[in-house]
């Protein structure tokens, strides 16, 4: 958890903010305390979404419905103001890490009995969610919080609010809502979603929990290939123990939603009793205990000089006092185990760590969120908090430094611009003389007024600029691969094609004119805090690059203006094309420099915000 910055509000509604837990595609997440002493998670909505009337309407509708779900196996919705200038919602603070955190970093795959208990809790959460007419639409390990008393589900129902501003279950960029590794076949195909879709996602979550792997593989071969396997191929359940758990997961992962096991049928297998004892391995329980005191150490922050005053929103009625985590059936109150906040319905944590393999060491796997992916995005992600925060770990596990390469690319692009400026100035001088030349052939022109010397100088400058561009290209490929890697960490499964294609697409004929743009837009979206970030910087750079690349492939550019023989008119045409090409290269270098600088800052800020 980070301290409040001067620009952060001190209160939202009736809640005193204690610190900032994270930032995602939907907005900011704060740790707060009510006037009656209850610790809550408060999420504010991004201004871009707050300006959408249809989003506000659906958001208010979903909040109203979500209040009825209750807090037995989910994060309870306590309060909200959907009419405020910046809408917000407050939920109970769940003391526990995400399932993704437990499996990918803290412990590894869970024992069979723990996963059966996990399945029971998640099924009861889905039963409650479906009972009020909601479909979760994004059930994944990052949306499952682990506590001593059992799992809790967060982030349910918000996709319907996204539908209102995007239409038909598609985001504005044409991506299906959901996280690729944890989507149902009908979700991928854009069909109407029912409770059966959540059951399929549950099967993938349980398979991941017990094996540390996704049942349909990762996005290493591309997001579209992963989606194809979900729709067409059978899951890989080799690591799932034979018996009750394998039958349960197989029943969830049936391709046909009409044949797929229902929540009620699955609950008959798992039962609906709360955990009667320690349902987690001793190592996980011990780690939960070590972090439990951190929440108790949270103090009200002192006002900062120049801090923004509280939002001018009417204070809602104070929420009724309750335990930090809901009391499970059986009457044993929940014990705070550590400081990871639940996110409100529709809000995953701020930054997602990549899914891991069967050991706690890192093996990446898709895990995005709707907005981000993403939410992806969402961008979905793990909110910063006391859980797992040690000085030895990077702020965002799995990310790589980008500042050095960003500086190197910036310097190379700046040198390219300088070289292009000198070359362009020489060509302009030659072009002025060539346009007024009245001679019959080029030989006389080259021998007049020192033109041959200017031509030699221009050719030398052009060769130097070309060599500089080649070096810039090599550094660019390293930088592009690095920012693509970090974007995959921010929004696992939301970046198209495999990691190697971050370099390979630049060498595919014809494909180089459009494929890198798609990857660049995915990287920008995963790195940007907004759910629908403006793409002007990406598109402007790409338009100039594509124009220059297309021009450089024209036959007219294959000869130099002074090697076309005696034809003066042909020399003038080639000189004109050369001037246009040099000018486009200069503009493309400027646009690329702006794109590199802004993306580098976005990624660095995203990493720093998770610290």
Image: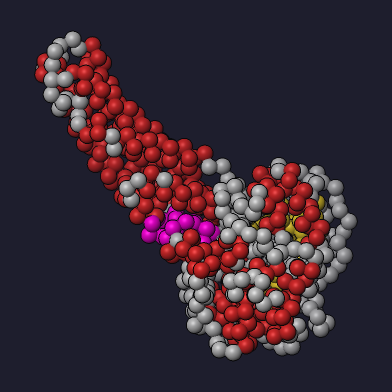
Q: Position of residue 287 (x, y in %)?
A: 62, 79
For residue 610, say whether it is visible: no
Give the vertical position of 585 relative to 596 (above or below): above
User: What is the quadrant of the C terminus in the image?
Assistant: bottom right
Q: Is residue 9 left or right of residue 486?
A: right
Residue at figure coordinates x 18%, y 10% from the top left: 438
Q: Nearer the viewer, residue 204 or 538?
A: 204
Residue at figure coordinates x 66%, y 79% from the top left: 118
Q: Is residue 559 left or right of residue 291?
A: left
For residue 277, say whether it is visible: yes
Q: Position of residue 367 (x, y in %)?
A: 55, 65
User: What is the quadrant of the N terminus in the image?
Assistant: bottom right
Q: Is residue 491 magenta?
A: yes
Give the vertical position of 533 relative to 455 (above or below): below
Residue at figure coordinates x 70%, y 84% from the top left: 270
Residue at figure coordinates x 75%, y 51% from the top left: 58
Q: Is residue 250 magenta?
A: no
Q: Which residues are magenta?
A: 481-501
Q: Is residue 480 left or right of residue 554?
A: right
Q: Position of residue 341 (x, y in %)?
A: 69, 65
Colour theme: secondary structure
Q: Position of residue 524 (x, y in %)?
A: 51, 49
Count all numbered tags in the image, as a single digit.
Answer: 0
Q: Nearer the viewer, residue 41 or 123?
A: 123
Give the vertical position of 51 relative to 177 (above or below): above
Q: Nearer the viewer, residue 519 or 32?
A: 519
Image quadrant of residue 564?
A: top left
């Amino acid at each position: 958890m980070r301290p409040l910055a001067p620009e952060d509000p001190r209160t939202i509604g009736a809640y005193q903010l204690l610190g900032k837990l994270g930032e995602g595609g939907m907005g900011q997440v704060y740790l707060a305390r009510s006037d009656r002493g209850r610790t809550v998670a408060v999420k504010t909505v991004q201004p871009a979404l707050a300006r959408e009337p249809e989003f506000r309407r659906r958001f208010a509708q979903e909040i109203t419905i979500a209040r009825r779900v209750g807090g037995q196996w989910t994060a309870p919705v306590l309060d909200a103001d959907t009419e405020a200038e910046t809408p917000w919602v407050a939920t109970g603070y769940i003391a526990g890490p995400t399932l993704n955190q437990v499996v990918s970093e803290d412990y590894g795959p869970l024992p069979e009995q723990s996963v059966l208990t996990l399945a029971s809790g998640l099924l009861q959460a889905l039963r409650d969610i479906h009972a009020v007419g909601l479909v979760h639409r994004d059930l994944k390990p990052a949306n499952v919080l682990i506590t001593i008393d059992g799992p809790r589900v967060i982030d349910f129902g918000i996709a319907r609010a996204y539908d209102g501003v995007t239409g038909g279950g598609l985001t504005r960029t044409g991506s299906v809502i959901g996280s690729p590794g944890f989507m149902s076949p009908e979700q991928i195909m854009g069909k109407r979603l029912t409770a059966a879709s959540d059951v399929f996602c549950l099967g993938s979550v349980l398979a991941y929990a017990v094996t540390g792997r996704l049942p349909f593989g990762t996005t290493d071969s591309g997001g579209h290939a992963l989606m194809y396997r979900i729709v067409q191929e059978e899951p890989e359940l080799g690591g799932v123990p034979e018996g009750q758990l394998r039958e349960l997961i197989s029943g969830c992962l049936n391709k046909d939603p009409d044949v797929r096991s229902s929540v009620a049928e699955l609950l008959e297998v798992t039962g609906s009793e709360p955990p009667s004892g320690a349902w987690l391995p001793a190592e996980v329980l011990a780690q939960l205990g070590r972090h439990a005191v951190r929440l108790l150490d949270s103090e009200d922050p002192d006002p900062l000089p120049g801090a923004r005053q509280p939002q001018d929103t009417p204070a809602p009625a104070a929420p009724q006092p309750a335990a930090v985590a809901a009391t499970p059936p059986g009457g044993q109150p929940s014990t705070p185990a550590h400081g990871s906040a639940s996110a409100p319905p529709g809000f995953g944590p701020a930054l997602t760590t990549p899914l891991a393999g069967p050991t706690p060491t890192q093996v990446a796997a898709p895990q995005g969120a709707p907005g981000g992916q993403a939410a992806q995005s969402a961008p979905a992600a793990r909110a910063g908090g006391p859980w797992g925060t040690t000085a030895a770990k990077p702020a965002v596990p799995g990310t790589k430094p980008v500042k050095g390469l960003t500086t190197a690319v910036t310097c190379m692009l700046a040198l390219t611009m300088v070289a292009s400026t000198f070359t362009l100035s020489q060509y302009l001088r030659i072009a002025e003389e060539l346009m007024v030349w009245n001679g019959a052939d080029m030989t006389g022109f080259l021998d007049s007024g020192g033109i041959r010397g200017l031509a030699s100088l221009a050719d030398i400058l052009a060769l130097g600029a070309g060599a500089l561009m080649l070096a810039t290209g090599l550094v660019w490929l390293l930088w592009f691969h690095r920012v693509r890697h970090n974007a995959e960490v921010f929004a696992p499964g939301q970046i198209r094609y495999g990691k190697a294609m971050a370099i390979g697409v630049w060498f595919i004929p014809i494909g180089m004119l459009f494929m890198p743009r798609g990857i660049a837009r995915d990287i920008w979206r995963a790195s940007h805090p907004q759910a629908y970030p403006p793409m002007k910087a990406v598109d402007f750079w790409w338009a100039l690059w594509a124009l220059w690349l297309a021009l450089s492939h024209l036959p007219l550019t294959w000869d130099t203006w002074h090697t076309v023989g005696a034809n003066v008119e042909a020399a003038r045409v080639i000189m004109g094309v050369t001037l246009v090409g040099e000018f486009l290269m200069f503009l493309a270098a400027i646009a690329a420099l702006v794109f590199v600088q802004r993306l580098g800052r976005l990624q660095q800020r995203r990493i720093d915000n998770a610290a």
